[in-house]
């Protein structure tokens, strides 16, 4: 289980990185960020990139910054950066809460937020966050910079709208309203394993009624997404066990479940029903 | 196959000037090129944690880093835990609480626990259990590892 | 929490001293096989096809690639059993003509580095004409199934049959017949160190040293020397520090034979370190069984008779030296477990399939048969509407020695006492109240019991009874007090985590009056250890410990003789303690170191009455003994997801005299963790074409710290008359009882739903599927 040989490039600036990427992308070149997903795939030789553009020494790209509207997260920001709340907004608490569910501590030391999105594992927690909160991905290449909405970004299992010469340089997450509540729940067989289903919900209460509900489901379909039917079941309703169950049921029904040798579509729906309801029941604050 | 790069790995304060292919993982370089075989390989895909070492203060899987990425960084391995024949409190606690049997996963657990406790000395019991579920042990059933790490955490905080 | 019932009255035996093994292991100074440098690295090219004819294996130009064509002179691995209609089948060390499972080694690539060898391996061009594979044992038994070995018609490699003479008569008297179809899926022992071998040729002597991760170094030497037509003296086998075995490292690996062959051919050193993927695919599997079990009970719910039909999927070949008989024959012999049931009928078959070869894994069959039998007992309790604890009370063996239906003799044990101890400690009424309260809140707790026997320390007659050509029963120990007074013990056992260096030192320390820290146990090297059978089957403390005690008794006798001579006192007045011989009631004494020195350097003083030197040998071949235990699991089942959390685990265990309680408890803890993994998480899954879907540690799931609960242990110590140290083995017990306790607890939790889970692992998918079927039916 030794990776196939590759040529490593170590750019120091973003421009340099993009130039190299433009050159090597057509020759099976890829970005190496945290490497916590890419290196295992290389160890199994499921990926044999000829070139790796290692962005760990690029100046900048390590920012977690807010302008009061959005939180910008650079390409070199590690999962562990979110272990503690990064800003005084419910979003900071949400990210901290979710972060501790990502794999294990040593993986979080190296893996990056943007790398996780670019890798686009259907069960990745950050992908679910990006999809649920309608993040904007900032893709950069020598051709320029373009924003990609989360709903357009995730195209399928480990497949995104990034072109081969584009680097996911930054992600923009909209801040949550100050009175937002959030809930997150995931199911895995062992601690730290990939989620077999995960749900992230956010909403506000306006006059005791749920407003601006977002219900995202990950791990259950080829890509995480918001489930409009579940959101519709919540908006305008007072929170209650009945309403939460209705939303969970709507989500379970709405998905087109991933199936594998062990996991039937029915079971995946069971899990979605459970994680959505639990995310709603255990919302913060 | 591909060309080798000359790098220096600093392990437990000692410099090792080596030449490695870019694909050489850090754990392979530590073991094969630097001869420090206390760090073990259990899965090479980031699940088991046997290869956990501390790089610039961070406990990481050394099978998921390339050696060239660790050049210039401070690497700590199990061989560097004891100082002048005095065991690190974590090592002593693993002995006292029978936190090892075959000893293969032990270096990884020691470096994981030391690495996390140095960063978060006041970590709570639940979070510590989360941390210790990062690595696999097939012999002990974990209960004695948990006891050992809790005892060592207390000892480390006291200093 | 741990409680022990009584001490031993000895100074060192019975104490939880720290392990002598630990200082090296915690400082990174352990020496494992993969730590050795080698000139050449080997990568095996393995079949990606489960069944077919090999048409072509073409190596890239200039690459060194070895295939079966190069190894014509190498004999096949052909283990032998002289009973049970066993059909010997041979396994070529590299696939020859036919491939029989995915992962079968077909070629060996030799290169300067592992990465380079893997690069070449990727380029080896293999063409196989695929044929239809048979993956499942039931499919392999079906009429018309493809024949995997011509020697074994119907794919049955062995067939054990037994029936008590009175069976039919008693069966007819039953008040109730309870039936169960149990399924145990395939598992991998998953030691944290996968397999590894390093073979080095020494030009000066012409010898090869094979360092490898084996539990049986001497057996490896005998087997490989045979296969390569070498004199055994020309092969040295070393088991250095070994990173866990759990049975997987008992069996001969074809890969090691290739390494020795290569070292001789290249006159150099070659190394192979198995990667995790290879280990999961090709590193031996186990526990793949179907058992149909029926129990006949009288009107008082006493078990009268058992009938079992056992089909074990043994994979593509038979493992050496135990043969594939280990699982089916162990299941047949020990199915009746701890119960007094005189009438027994059994059919046990070993079934060949196109899957990885089965080999022993901790507990060998007993985790499966205990789960099956204990499920049957719970089902029977339910049918009789009595408590699961109560039904066990009515049938557990209580009088000793007890002779089983098949003639096994059970020595003194505490089946009933450990059950009562566990029942009391867990506080069943309090649990039932908590369970009831939780159910009203939609939470489903369950409690499960497992009572079982753990046969350990069996000597050569037990293996001979199975018809094994190799009967690995005895052990020899050579104990030396050197001229400095330091004690060195050479043993044939080959511990790898069990703490045997410490426990043997404790036994010796008491016998000859020294401290354990001056005792060094030497093992795992055929050049320095006496011939022995290694470490497996919970045998080493009983057998090697017994041999150690015998050798220590001889040394003690010699020391007393010398002291008597030097101190001019009657032998009966000499006391050995604190590193010295003393004359009782006086202040006259002489150190053991001084006596040892004189035994080598001043032999003339003993006038020929005492042999020079101080080395004694002990050999022990015991009849075998039975440990026993009651395990209790408390679980919570999340009925929406099927997830099971083991909340608490309690054990009441009797393993005879406990030499080191810390080590004993550690063995039980580790076994339970594996048992919980086996019960809930671990499964090797093949697809229909024979490919493995669980070839990494994310898909094959050993438990983490999160999945293992607090474990409470209680011990009863019934000194065994069948073991001269009074110790019984306990290495496997944790693993044997845990699946049964966990599965029974799950079923208890799910009682309100009327579903039955008779399958391990009880994955959340399976639990939900059972619940969903009920929901949909309702």
Image (cartoon, rainbow, N blue to C red):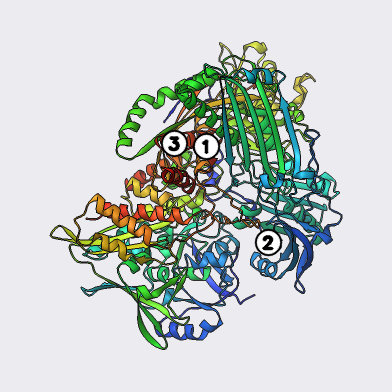
Q: Which residue is mark 1?
A: C739
Which quadrant holds the N terminus of chain A?
bottom right
Q: Position of residue A212 (x, y in %)?
A: 22, 66
From the viewer's perspective, tell me whether residue A223 is left or right of residue C723: left
Residue C513 can be seen in this image: no
Q: Residue C754, labelled with which disc?
A: 3
Figure check: A247 above or below C729: below
Q: First in sequence: mark 1 or mark 3? A: 1
From the viewer's perspective, tell me whether residue C206 is left or right of residue B47: right
Q: Residue C48, labelled with which disc?
A: 2
Query: Disc 3 is attached to a residue of which chain?
Result: C
Q: Residue A191, labelled with which disc?
A: none
Q: Position of residue C761 (x, y in %)?
A: 53, 43
Figure check: A47 above or below B115: below
The secondary element bearing badge 2 is classed as loop
Q: Residues within 10 Å of mark 1 (few under 14, many from 20)?
A: many
Is mark 2 in CB contact (under 8 Å) with mark 3? no
The image quadrant of residue C601 is top right
Q: Nearer the viewer, residue C338 or A272?
A: A272
Which residue sits at x=18%, y=64%? Answer: A178
Comparing labels 1 and 3, the label whose residue is closer to the camera: 3
Figure check: C8 above or below C141: above
Q: First in sequence: mark 2 or mark 1? A: 2
Comparing labels 2 and 3, the label whose residue is closer to the camera: 3
Spatial distance from mark 1 to mark 3, Cα to Cα? 21 Å
């Amino acid at each position: 289980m030794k990776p196939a040989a590759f040529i490593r490039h170590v750019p120091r600036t973003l421009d340099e990185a993009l130039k190299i990427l433009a050159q090597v992308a057509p020759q099976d070149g890829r970005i190496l960020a945290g490497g916590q997903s890419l290196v295992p795939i290389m160890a199994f030789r499921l990926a044999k990139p000829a070139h790796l553009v290692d962005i760990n020494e690029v100046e900048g790209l390590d920012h977690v910054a807010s302008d009061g509207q959005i939180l910008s997260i650079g390409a070199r920001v590690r999962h562990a950066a979110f272990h503690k709340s990064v800003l005084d907004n419910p979003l900071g608490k949400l990210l901290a809460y979710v972060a501790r569910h990502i794999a294990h501590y040593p993986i979080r030391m190296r893996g990056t937020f943007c790398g996780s999105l670019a890798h686009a594992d259907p069960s990745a927690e950050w992908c679910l966050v990006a999809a649920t909160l309608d993040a904007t991905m900032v893709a950069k290449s020598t051709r320029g910079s373009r924003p990609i909405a989360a709903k357009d970004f995730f195209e399928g299992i480990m497949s995104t709208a990034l072109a081969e010469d584009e680097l996911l340089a930054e992600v923009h997450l909209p801040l949550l309203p100050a009175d937002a509540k959030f809930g997150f729940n995931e199911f895995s067989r062992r601690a730290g394993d990939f989620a077999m289903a995960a749900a992230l919900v956010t909403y506000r209460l306006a006059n005791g009624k749920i407003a601006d509900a977002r219900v995202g489901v990950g791990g259950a379909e080829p890509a995480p997404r918001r489930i409009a039917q579940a959101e519709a079941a919540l908006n305008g309703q007072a929170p209650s066990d009945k309403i939460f169950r209705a939303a969970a049921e709507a989500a379970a029904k709405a998905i087109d479940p991933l199936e594998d040798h062990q996991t039937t579509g029915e079971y995946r729906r069971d899990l979605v029903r459970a994680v959505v309801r639990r995310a709603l029941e255990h919302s913060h604050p | 196959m591909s060309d080798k790069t000359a790098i220096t790995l600093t392990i437990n304060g000692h410099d090792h000037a080596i030449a490695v292919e870019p694909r050489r993982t850090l754990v392979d370089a530590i073991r094969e090129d630097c001869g420090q075989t206390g760090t073990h390989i259990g899965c090479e895909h980031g699940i088991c944690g046997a290869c956990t070492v501390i790089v610039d203060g961070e406990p990481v899987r050394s099978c998921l880093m390339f050696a060239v990425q660790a050049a210039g960084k401070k690497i700590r391995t199990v061989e560097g835990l004891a100082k002048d024949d005095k065991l690190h409190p974590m090592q002593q606690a693993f002995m006292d609480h029978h936190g090892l049997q075959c000893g293969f996963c032990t270096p990884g657990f020691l470096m994981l626990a030391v690495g996390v406790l140095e960063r978060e000395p006041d970590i709570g019991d639940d979070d510590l259990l989360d941390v210790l579920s990062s690595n696999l042990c097939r012999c002990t059933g974990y209960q004695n590892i948990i006891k050992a790490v809790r005892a060592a955490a207390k000892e480390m905080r006291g200093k | 929490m741990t409680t022990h019932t009584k001490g031993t009255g000895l100074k060192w035996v019975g104490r939880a001293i720290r392990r002598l093994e630990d200082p090296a292991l915690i400082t990174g100074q352990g020496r494992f096989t993969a730590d050795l440098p080698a000139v050449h690295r080997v990568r095996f090219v393995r079949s990606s096809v489960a069944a077919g004819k090999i048409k072509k294996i073409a190596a890239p130009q200039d690459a060194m690639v070895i295939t079966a064509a190069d190894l014509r002179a190498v004999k096949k691995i052909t283990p032998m059993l002289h009973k049970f209609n066993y059909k010997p089948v041979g396994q070529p060390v590299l696939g020859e003509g036919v491939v029989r499972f995915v992962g079968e080694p077909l070629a060996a690539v030799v290169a300067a580095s592992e990465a380079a060898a893997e690069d070449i391996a990727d380029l080896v061009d293999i063409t196989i004409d695929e044929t239809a594979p048979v993956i499942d044992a039931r499919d392999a038994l079906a009429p018309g199934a493809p024949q995997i070995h011509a020697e074994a018609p119907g794919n049955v490699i062995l067939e054990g049959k037994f029936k008590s003479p009175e069976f039919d008569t008693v069966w007819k008297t039953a008040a109730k017949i309870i039936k169960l179809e149990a399924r145990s899926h395939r598992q991998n022992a998953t030691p944290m160190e996968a397999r590894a071998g390093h073979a080095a040729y020494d030009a000066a002597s012409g010898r090869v040293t094979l360092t490898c991760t084996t539990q049986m170094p001497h057996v490896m030497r005998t087997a490989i020397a045979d296969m390569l037509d070498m004199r055994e003296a020309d092969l040295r086998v070393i088991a250095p520090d070994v990173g866990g075995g759990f049975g997987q490292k008992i069996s001969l690996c074809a890969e090691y034979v290739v390494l020795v062959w290569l070292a001789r051919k290249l006159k150099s050193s070659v190394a192979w370190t198995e990667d995790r993927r290879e280990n999961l695919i090709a590193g031996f599997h186990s526990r793949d069984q179907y058992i149909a079990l029926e129990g006949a009970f009288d009107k008082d719910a006493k078990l009268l008779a058992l009938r079992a039909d056992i089909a074990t999927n043994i994979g593509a070949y038979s493992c050496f030296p135990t043969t594939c008989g280990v699982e089916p024959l162990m299941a047949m012999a020990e199915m009746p477990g701890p119960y007094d049931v005189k009438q027994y009928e059994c059919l046990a078959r070993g079934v060949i399939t196109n899957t990885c070869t089965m080999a022993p894994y901790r507990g060998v069959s007993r985790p499966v048969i205990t789960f099956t039998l204990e499920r049957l007992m719970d089902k029977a309790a339910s049918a009789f509407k009595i408590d699961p604890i109560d039904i066990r009370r009515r049938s557990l063996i209580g009088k000793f020695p007890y002779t089983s239906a098949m003639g096994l003799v059970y020595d003194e044990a505490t089946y009933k006492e450990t059950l009562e101890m566990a029942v009391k400690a867990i506080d069943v009424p309090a649990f039932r109240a908590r369970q009831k309260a939780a159910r009203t809140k939609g939470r489903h707790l369950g409690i499960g019991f497992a009572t079982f026997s753990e046969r350990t320390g069996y000597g050569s007659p037990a293996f001979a009874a199975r018809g094994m050509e190799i009967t690995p029963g005895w052990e020899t120990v050579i104990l030396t007090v050197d001229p400095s007074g330091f004690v060195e013990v050479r043993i044939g056992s080959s511990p790898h985590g069990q703490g045997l260096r410490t426990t043997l030192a404790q036994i010796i320390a008491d016998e000859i009056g020294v401290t354990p820290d001056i005792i060094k146990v030497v093992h795992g090297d055929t050049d320095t250890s006496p011939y022995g059978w290694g470490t497996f089957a919970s045998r080493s403390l009983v057998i090697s410990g017994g041999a150690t005690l015998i050798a220590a008794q001889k040394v003690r006798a010699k020391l007393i003789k010398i002291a008597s001579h030097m101190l001019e006192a009657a032998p009966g007045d000499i006391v050995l303690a604190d590193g010295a011989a003393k004359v009782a009631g006086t202040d006259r004494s002489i150190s053991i170191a001084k006596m040892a020195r004189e035994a080598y350097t001043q032999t003339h003083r003993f006038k020929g009455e005492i042999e020079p030197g101080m080395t004694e040998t002990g050999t022990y071949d015991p009849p075998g003994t039975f440990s026993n235990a009651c395990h209790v699991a408390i679980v919570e089942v999340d009925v929406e997801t099927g997830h099971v959390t083991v909340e608490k685990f309690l054990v009441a265990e009797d393993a005879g005299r406990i030499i080191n309680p810390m080590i004993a408890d550690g063995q039980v803890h580790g076994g339970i963790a594996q048992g919980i993994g086996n019960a809930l998480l671990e499964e090797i899954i093949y697809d229909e074409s024979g490919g493995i879907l669980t070839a990494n540690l994310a898909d094959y799931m050993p438990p983490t710290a999160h999945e293992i609960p607090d474990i409470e242990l209680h011990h009863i110590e019934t000194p065994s008359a069948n073991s001269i140290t009074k110790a019984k083995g306990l290495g496997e017990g944790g693993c044997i009882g845990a699946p049964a306790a966990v599965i029974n607890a799950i079923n208890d939790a799910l009682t309100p739903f009327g579903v039955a889970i008779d399958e391990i692992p009880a994955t959340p998918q399976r639990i939900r599927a059972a619940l969903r079927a009920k929901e949909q039916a309702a």
